[in-house]
Amino acid sequence: MYSPNMNSVPEEAAVPGTVLIPMRFVWRHGGNSVFLCGSFTQWAQLVPMLPVENCDNVFQTVYGLLPGYHQYKFCVDGQWRYDESEHHVTCEYGIVNTLHLSTDDMDVDTETFRRVVRVTDGTLTEVVPSISETDLQASRQRISAFLTNHTVYELLPESGKVVALDVDLPVKQAFHILHEQGIPMAPLCDVRRGQFVGVLSAFDFILILRELGNNASNLTEEELETHTISAWKEGKAYLNRQNDCHGRAFPRRFIHAGPNDNLNDVALKILQNEVATVPIIYSSSEDGSFPQLLHLASLTGILKCICRYFRHSASSLPILQLPICSIPVGTWAPKIGESNRQPLAMLRPSASLRSALNLLVQARVSSIPIVDDNDSLLDIYCRSDITALAKDRAYTHINLDEMTVHQALQQLGQDLYSAYELRSQRCQMCLRSDSLHKVMERLANPGVRRLVIVEAGSKRVEGIVSLSDIFKFLFG
């Protein structure tokens, strides 16, 4: 077997004008020897890749590349392979991965931003890049200026559907509508007053199930039938008053925005009020009568605008080049990274559904990674998943203490030990070495509200980063 000499970085890395690019390849079947080959080696030279410590199926190397279009593939134990997760094309060399390195990437201060690799005793050690406070604030100011100069109008789709609920609807019916429409929340309209007055979300149903579950071992459809949405909201305000140490009621005011509001203000409104979406309401009259519901604005849409605007100039924003492990963003498992909030909440598949709902409420999180005994990611349970209990009226015959998280996920058509493709759509993941820009691009996709940070190969959960985490960091 060929044994590469790793006492030095490849000579190409020292050529003036090149940029050090970390190349990583995950081969789930393992391998004894992995090499990198590409157009930058004239397809004649094999660049050896080393296995990552404690991950026998993850291989990496660092190579210096000039600006331009590059093609590459991997040789695993004598067999040619390519990375299916990265962009690939078919050419005379078969299926190959591609990489386009623009001249913009050369404008970045390479001493500050590129991954510097030291080789000591045959071990690759990554030095985590950092930026100065001045560059950090400059990046934040550019993003804030962009958001301030753009309005909600840019979020409005050319066509679409927005579901609103009458406050006099029974909670049970509202429960079914959210499930059937595949939405986690809906604005509430008081038809008699001609106003939008609030929202009903999956979180409301979690509170309802917990409250009713305290009074009976099994939930009945009749119990939900007797509650209208307005009655539940009044009861929720009473519960809040009971839980308030000052004995005051604090029913939330209706959080909304207008189409002319700037994106910076809307994002701050979402963060400060700890809501997932903000209804966009328009009225042509001065008194606000006859309001029209135009859209539901979320951080996803705002982040998509940011990514689209800075996509071709990302290298000019130092903040976007940093790996997420080097910045105070997200929630991390102990001894993995800095946690700027509460500890990371995780559960086993055998945990009861009640424990999952309690954790969602008490930890004030929107999702919980479901892990095995080695803390490797199996699935994720989200607030919005509670609406699946409307299927076949499952809520009428469940016991929150007896139903496990595994069984609850099966209500979604999930099986922790099969249907990998379906689960991979729900369990969006990233690595701690991924740049902030890459994480933002992933979170800008519709339906993705958080990424689970996992260890390459083992999928051991290292942390979780959400949309709100990203915006709190960007706003400083």
Image (cartoon, rainbow, N blue to C red):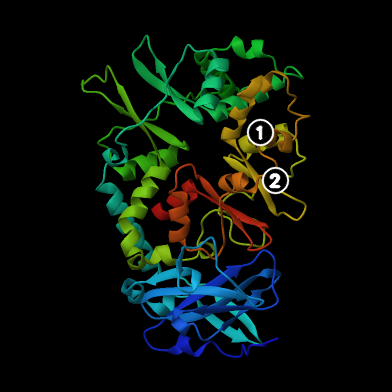
On screen, residue 149 above or below 36: above
Residue type highlighted by circle 1: Leu
- Mark 2 or mark 1: which is in front? 2
On screen, residue 67 above or below 215: below
Quadrant for the C terminus in the image: bottom left
List x then y, in percent, for residue 406. 73, 38
On screen, residue 77 above or below 209: below
On screen, residue 57 above or below 467: below
In this view of the protein, can residue 138 be seen by the observer?
Answer: no
Of the numbered discs 2 and 1, the one sitting upstream in the chain is 1
Residue 418: numbered disc: 2
Question: Could you tell whether 283 is left or right of 101 in the image?
Answer: left
Image point 61% across, 90% down: which residue? 7
List x then y, in percent, for residue 22. 51, 74
List x then y, in percent, for residue 239. 59, 22
Hey, which quadrant is residue 106 in on the image?
bottom left
Image point 37% across, 45% down: which residue? 302
Q: Which residue is mark 1?
A: 357
Image point 36% across, 67% down: which residue? 315
Residue positioned most to the front? 92
Quadrant for the N terminus in the image: bottom right
Task: Work out how far the residue at label 2 is from the one at label 1, CA to CA, in angstroms.
Answer: 24 Å
List x then y, in percent, for residue 169. 50, 13
Q: Nearer the viewer, residue 47 or 464?
A: 47
Question: Could you tell whether 145 is left or right of 98 in the image?
Answer: left
